[in-house]
Image: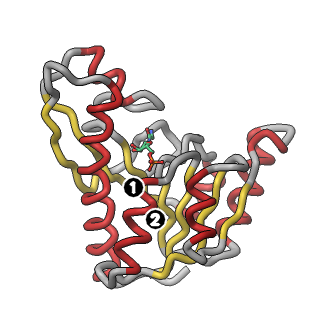
Amino acid sequence: MRIVVLVSGTGSNLQAVIDAVKAGELDVDLAAVGADRSGTYGVERSAAAGIPTFVVDFKAYSDRSAWNAALTEAVAAYRPDVVVSSGFMRIVSADFIDVFGGRYLNTHPALLPAFPGAHGVRDALAYGVKVTGCTVHWADAGVDTGPIIAQEAVPVAETDTEETLHERIKAAERRLLVSTLRSLAAAPQSPN
Ligand code: GAR
């Protein structure tokens, strides 16, 4: 199973995938890592691991549809079976979903459909939930929407800040992302 991973920042979930592949615990071909901006640590650590990288800088395009078209083309060049949004903080267009729909995976730090968006951890904490968690799902052109594949619950501690809670959620997220990819890799893939 060939995968392309999209990131916008640190890429700690991506690192878990890289580590699992290197350890022989996850049988996927990490074809490339792409970002929507230059200078991300996610791209830096992928390059250091010898993985091809690309950047489709959102700010370099006049409008969202031109950026979406360029992203779609850049990802398609690697002929992925599955595209993973791993902390990729941009909404893709219906055009992207026309090409990658049904094989575009997203990871989110909340129990969807609760607390979608860029601040899932902060919003859950502000609401006062006692349990939150993470979700891996097939993404569509919405904000953290699409069929859920797997979820893991994480209890909220009285003393939690956004940072401490997010760290515990990320630990669960890393497990969930790797185990989901392992299950998908074991299942037959449809040809591109
Ligand atoms: C992860 O917690 C991921 O779920 C979240 O961004 C973080 C990226 O961390 N994504 C979203 O909030 C999407 N709505 P990482 O770059 O260290 O993997």
Residue 5 in picture, x, y percent from top left: 53, 63
Image quadrant where one finds the C terminus: bottom right
Respond yes or no on whether mark 2 lies under 8 Å from ligand 1: no
Residue 138 in picture, x, y percent from top left: 39, 55
Circle 1 sits on which residue?
138
Helix, strand, or loop for circle 1? strand
In the picture, residue 176 is in which quadrant? bottom left
In the picture, residue 150 is in which quadrant? bottom left
Q: Residue at x 16, y 42 (%)?
A: 153
| Of the image marks 1 and 2, the number of the one nearer the N terminus | 2
Residue 68 in picture, x, y percent from top left: 71, 50
Q: Foreground residue, 27 or 97?
A: 27
Q: Residue at x 50, y 73 (%)?
A: 3
In the image, is 7 to the left or to the right of 76?
left
Color style of the picture: secondary structure
Give the vertical position of 161 relative to 37 (above or below).
above
Mark 1: which amino acid? Answer: Trp
The disc placed on residue 103 is 2
Q: Quadrant of ligand 1?
A: top left
Mark 2: which amino acid? Answer: Arg
The disc placed on residue 94 is none
Crowd around label 2: few <14 · some 14–19 · many ≥20 (10 Å): many
- The residues tagged by marks 1 and 2 sit, at their Cα atoms, a distance apart of 7 Å
Helix, strand, or loop for circle 2? loop
Residue 119 in picture, x, y percent from top left: 43, 27
Q: Residue at x 28, y 32 (%)?
A: 164
Q: Foreground residue, 82 or 36?
A: 36
Respond yes or no on whether mark 1 lies under 8 Å from ligand 1: no
